[in-house]
Image (cartoon, rainbow, N blue to C red):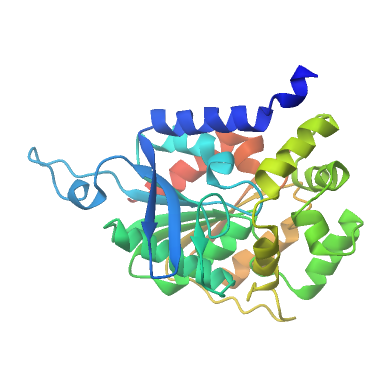
């Protein structure tokens, strides 16, 4: 049938790219070292010159890095935030290594490696000060970026990201998903497995036919599957019964959905205490693991208020 030749995922991907372009971002790539190339969406103008005061005394906008989670890469997870924030910030949306067009020949697979690549990317484009926002797996990376470069990172937002997880939290997640291995949940290969992920990650679910879900898997989950599984196994955070979480020097905001079934809300409350006096928590009601998609209006307002407070 003719409809079998239509990829709705590809069509929507084109819409997302046009949306980012209309927000003033362009698709770019930079080699961060001899082994690794990072693709990102960022300001069209040259960042180094743009950071200098203009002739009329105005200064450029503050810089903001949006770090995506596991699954679809950045443009899929942050489109609504880019559209809202681009008038106020120079927004950078990198693809983490093995997502989208970012690649490496390195054998490193930890979130520390991902954070190093993001930090080096910002060095290469000439940005010395920026805030970071990370969701889910991207929250692990954002935490590491802030930890590694406290002199560069101004504010930190960790959304729906249990960086304080323990092995038992992972086991409990597998029970909730009714699967035996984490890749069955995070790297779905069948429509049934993707439905399980949506059941845990999204509070307002709509029925999607198998052909649509299979298209989603083929276009967004099929790439670099072996390497992505290595990324899951390569996480340093979450390997010990006592979380190795230290307070950050920066102001930190945690944003969570009250119905998150990937990282439960209790984890957010514990993480706030671990991060110390500079950390605060905002809970979005009737949202699950992707509040930036499910309730973008509330998420954007919370994010904007935090980033612009005393900035």
Quadrant where the N terminus sits is: top right
Residue 269 visible in the shown view: no
- From the top left corner, tell me how far across and down residue 286 is, in percent: 73, 38
Compared with 45, 2 (above or below) is above
Residue 202 visible in the shown view: yes
Compared with 12, 154 (above or below) is below
Q: Quadrant of residue 150?
A: bottom left
Q: Nearer the viewer, residue 253 or 70?
A: 70
Q: Nearer the viewer, residue 213 or 57?
A: 213
* Residue 210 placement, left or right of 166: right
Q: Quadrant of residue 237?
A: bottom right
* Residue 101 placement, left or right of 44: right
- From the top left corner, tell me how far across and down residue 123 is, in percent: 31, 63
Please name the residue shown 79% across and 48% down the image: 197
Q: Nearer the viewer, residue 211 or 81?
A: 211
* Residue 60 placement, left or right of 111: left
- From the top left corner, tell me how far across and down residue 298 is, in percent: 58, 36
Please name the residue shown 57% across and 75% down the image: 107
Extreme left residue here?
A: 55
- From the top left corner, tell me how far across and down residue 274 is, in percent: 60, 72
| Count of marks placed on residues | 0
Compared with 175, 14 (above or below) is above
Compared with 172, 214 (above or below) is above
Extreme top residue here?
A: 2
């Amino acid at each position: 049938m003719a409809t079998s030749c239509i990829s709705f995922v590809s069509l929507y991907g084109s819409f997302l790219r046009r949306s980012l372009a209309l927000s003033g971002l362009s698709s770019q790539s930079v080699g961060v070292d001899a082994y690794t190339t990072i693709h990102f969406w960022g300001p069209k103008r040259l960042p180094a010159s743009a950071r200098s005061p203009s002739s009329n005394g105005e200064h450029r906008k503050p810089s903001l890095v949006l770090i995506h989670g596991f699954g679809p890469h950045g443009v899929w997870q942050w489109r609504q935030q880019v559209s809202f924030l681009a008038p106020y910030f120079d927004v950078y949306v990198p693809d983490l290594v093995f997502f989208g067009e970012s690649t490496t020949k390195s054998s490193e697979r930890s979130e520390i490696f991902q954070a190093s690549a993001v930090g080096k990317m910002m060095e290469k484009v000439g940005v010395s000060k920026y805030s970071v926002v990370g969701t889910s797996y991207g929250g692990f990376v954002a935490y590491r970026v802030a930890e590694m470069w406290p002199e560069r990172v101004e504010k930190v937002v960790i959304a729906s990201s249990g960086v304080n997880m323990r092995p038992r939290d992972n086991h409990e997640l597998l029970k909730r998903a009714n699967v035996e291995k984490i890749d069955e949940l995070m790297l779905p290969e069948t429509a049934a497995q993707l439905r399980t992920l949506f059941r845990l990650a999204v509070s307002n679910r709509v029925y999607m036919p198998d052909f649509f879900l299979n298209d989603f898997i083929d276009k967004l989950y099929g790439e670099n599957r072996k390497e992505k599984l290595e990324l899951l196994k390569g996480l340093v955070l979450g390997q010990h019964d006592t979380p190795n979480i230290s307070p950050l020097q920066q102001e930190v905001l945690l944003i969570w959905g009250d119905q998150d079934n990937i990282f439960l809300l209790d984890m957010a409350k514990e993480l706030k205490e671990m991060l110390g006096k500079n950390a605060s928590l905002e809970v979005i009601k009737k949202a699950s693991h992707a509040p930036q998609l499910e309730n973008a209006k509330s998420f954007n307002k919370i994010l904007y208020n935090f980033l612009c407070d005393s900035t």
